[in-house]
Amino acid sequence: MKNTISINKTLRPFNCNLKIEGDKSLSIRWALLASQALGQSSAENILKSDDVISTLKCLNKLGVKSKLTRNRCTINGVGINGFKYKKNIILNAGNSGTLGRLIVGLLIHSKNDIKIIGDKSLSKRDFSRIIKPLKKYGAKFISNKGKLPLVIKGIKNPKPINYIENKGSAQVKTSLMFASLNTKGTTTIKAKKSRNHTELLFKHLNLPIKITKKKTYDLIKIQGKKKINSLNYKIPSDISSSAFFIVLTALSNNSKLSLKNVNINPSRVGIIKILKMMGVKIIYKNIKYYNGEKIADIFVRSAKFLRSINCPSSLNSSAIDEFLVIFLIAAKAKGTSYFKDLSELNQKESPRLKWGSKILKLMGIKTITNANSIKIFGNPNLVINKKIIIKNYLKDHRIFMTSVIAALTFGGKWVIHDKNCFKTSFPSFLNIIDKIKKN
Ligand code: S3P
């Protein structure tokens, strides 16, 4: 079967109302926490992507039964320390850094060795960021120089830790928070600001968590060894998936878009702030809350004029998964945009800072890029006429989707390889594009 997609036409003006699939971070967190609860938990609008399916499969190997129907997932929790599994099991986290790093936090007390593996992309990613702090609880690990495969050699009675998390990584923070659930005493994490879904879920579950918010970090204290109640949950649409269509609309001519029930948690809306600063008109309507998470309908229209930005690095963590599409906006903006302190972007499913710069160069946009920053010399009149081939990008779902958005807005003849990789986070992505085309 052909594994490429060819695009050689830009979109006609559109006016669409869309519903985007459920949030990936929340879907994975809910499933992992539901496994630790006593009794059956249920989630509406869970994301049915490869990363979430990998999560359910890993839980299944640990003795946790789940059922996935059209729009709902139920999980029969086994309680803290309740996993039941065979000796020498192997858990495959697939492409998901979130699953791979978070599940290890739940397994530091395992009686037998558990091996975590992943696909080619995940096997290149750094796990020392969780190994180092989780060792402080007393757990032992064997890894491939801080990468997968990782063998967890658990500890019967983990000791609570004090840890300074200074990467601003929600995955590290959450892995430690999960480890604290099975640890007697108070775990303290001083965490540089990052998405706070786990904190909100812990609060919603009435777990003993205390958070002191400071300007650049949060001080999180958790009392472990408490019972977790089952959790009925409603998952809002993913802002990171929505971002592709927000940018598509901003870059298209005379178009309008509305997106229903999107998660606008303040720790995730860096893209909205950055795009507004660059001249995109975006408004929220019908703001409400689901289980502590802030939700809104988002309205966006084509941008008449885009200005460059010197992006404050304080927004980096809240836009970390959206920079590739933000770079497309910068490509069309008047002036030179500057994005800095972004070394973490090269730690994702592919080295995304490098890839962002590579795609822009193929599009004819000048950039100056180093290991942690990029300068983008925008061209408001950019029209592409040449052939562009995107391949060998470690099947990074966001590179694929960014390339599709660029092809549909700037023109040119694009051939994008690995056309199924977007299914890790956003399986309906191409169906939505078809829906917009038919509009
Ligand atoms: C995620 C956190 C972010 C993000 C990833 C999902 C999460 O990674 O890039 O896609 O669900 O916690 P880091 O926490 O490593 O920055």
Image (cartoon, rainbow, N blue to C red):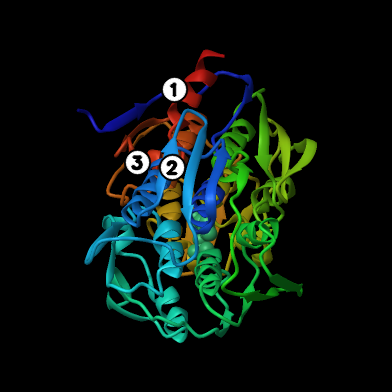
Amino acid type, residue under disc 1 in the picture: Lys
Q: Position of residue 192 (x, y in %)?
A: 63, 73
Between marks 3 and 1, how big is the CA–CA gap? 22 Å
Q: Which residue appears farthest toward the top when viewing the image?
A: 438
Write down the quadrant of residue 319 in the picture.
bottom right
Q: Residue at x 32, y 35 (%)?
A: 419
User: In 3D space, how far apart are the residues under numbered discs 3 and 2 (Cα atoms)?
Assistant: 22 Å
Q: Earlier in the sequence, mark 1 or mark 2?
A: 1
The C terminus: image quadrant: top right
In the picture, measured across the screen, residue 178 lies left or right of residue 129, that is right
Q: Which residue is mark 1?
A: 9
The label nearer to you, 1 versus 2, is: 1
Task: Name the residue at 56% across, 57% down.
Answer: 320
Q: Classify mark 2: residues with Cα within 10 Å, few (<14), some (14-19) or many (20+).
A: many
Residue on which disc 3 sits: 421
Residue 321 seen in render: no
Label 2, on which residue?
A: 363
Element at label 3: helix
State how far apart marks 1 and 2 are (Cα): 15 Å
Q: Nearer the viewer, residue 325 or 189?
A: 189
Classed neighbour count for the residue bearing mark 3: other residues with Cα under 10 Å, few (<14), some (14–19), many (≥20): many
Percent position of residue 308, x then y? 66, 51
Residue type for callout 2? Met
First reached walking from the N terminus: tag 3 or tag 1: 1
Asked whether mark 1 and ligand 1 are closer than 8 Å, the reply comes as: no
Q: Amino acid at mark 3?
A: Cys
Q: Quadrant of the N terminus?
A: top left
> In this rendering, would 245 be left or right of 141?
right
Q: Residue at x 35, y 50 (%)?
A: 60
- Where is residue 273 shown, x and y percent of the image? 72, 51
